[in-house]
Image: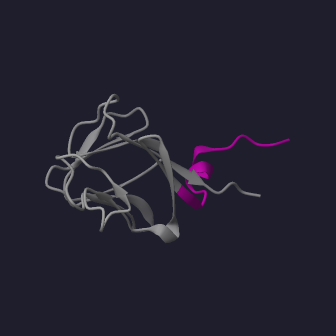
């Protein structure tokens, strides 16, 4: 008989990739694709977000202290909402990503904003 999967087991599963959903497109980001830059500059960023509140190189999805997370380098900050928790504003700092949620460059998260980025962490299944 299979034992129930524990929260600890899920959180310690090896990272496989990160999925971003932006304007109807899906981007899969493997560990080898990190760092992955988001911002206005089409020459420097892997995901271009073209609005005035986004910096040229706004934020980076990166690996820091063995955690995949978001590193904000912007003027206006990055809003992050993980799961159903309240959104937080990150300014010039790193925040680890877990589960799934939303990223908004330079402004407060708004479900109706076409520049809202959805993310999902995907882990390798054992076996």
Residue 14: quarter of image: bottom right
Residue nearest the observer in this picture, 117 or 99: 117
Q: Is residue 114 visible?
A: yes
Q: Is residue 71 visible?
A: no
Residue 16 in the magenta stretch? The answer is: yes
For the point 26% across and 49% down, the residue is 50
Q: Position of residue 89 (x, y in %)?
A: 23, 44
Q: Quadrant of the N terminus?
A: top right
Residue nearest the observer in this picture, 76 or 86: 76
Range shown magenta:
1-17
106 is higher (above) or lower (below) than 109: below
37 is higher (above) or lower (below) than 3: below
Residue 112: quarter of image: top left
For the point 81% across and 43% down, the residue is 2
Q: Position of residue 91 (x, y in %)?
A: 19, 53
For the point 27% across and 56% down, the residue is 39
Residue 67: quarter of image: bottom left
For the point 63% across and 44% down, the residue is 6
Residue nearest the observer in this picture, 33 or 89: 33
Relative to 25, 16 lies left or right: right
């Amino acid at each position: 008989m299979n034992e129930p999967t524990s929260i600890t087991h899920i959180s310690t599963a090896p990272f496989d990739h990160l999925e971003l959903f932006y304007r109807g497109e899906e981007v899969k980001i493997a560990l080898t694709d990190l760092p992955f830059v988001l911002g206005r500059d089409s020459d420097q960023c892997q995901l271009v977000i073209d609005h005035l509140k986004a910096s040229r190189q706004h934020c980076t999805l990166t690996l820091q202290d063995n955690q995949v997370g978001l590193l904000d380098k912007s003027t206006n900050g990055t809003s992050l909402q993980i799961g159903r928790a309240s959104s937080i504003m990150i300014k010039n700092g790193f925040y680890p990503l877990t589960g799934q949620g939303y990223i908004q460059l330079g402004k407060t998260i708004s479900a109706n904003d076409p520049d809202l980025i959805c993310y999902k962490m995907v882990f390798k299944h054992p076996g």
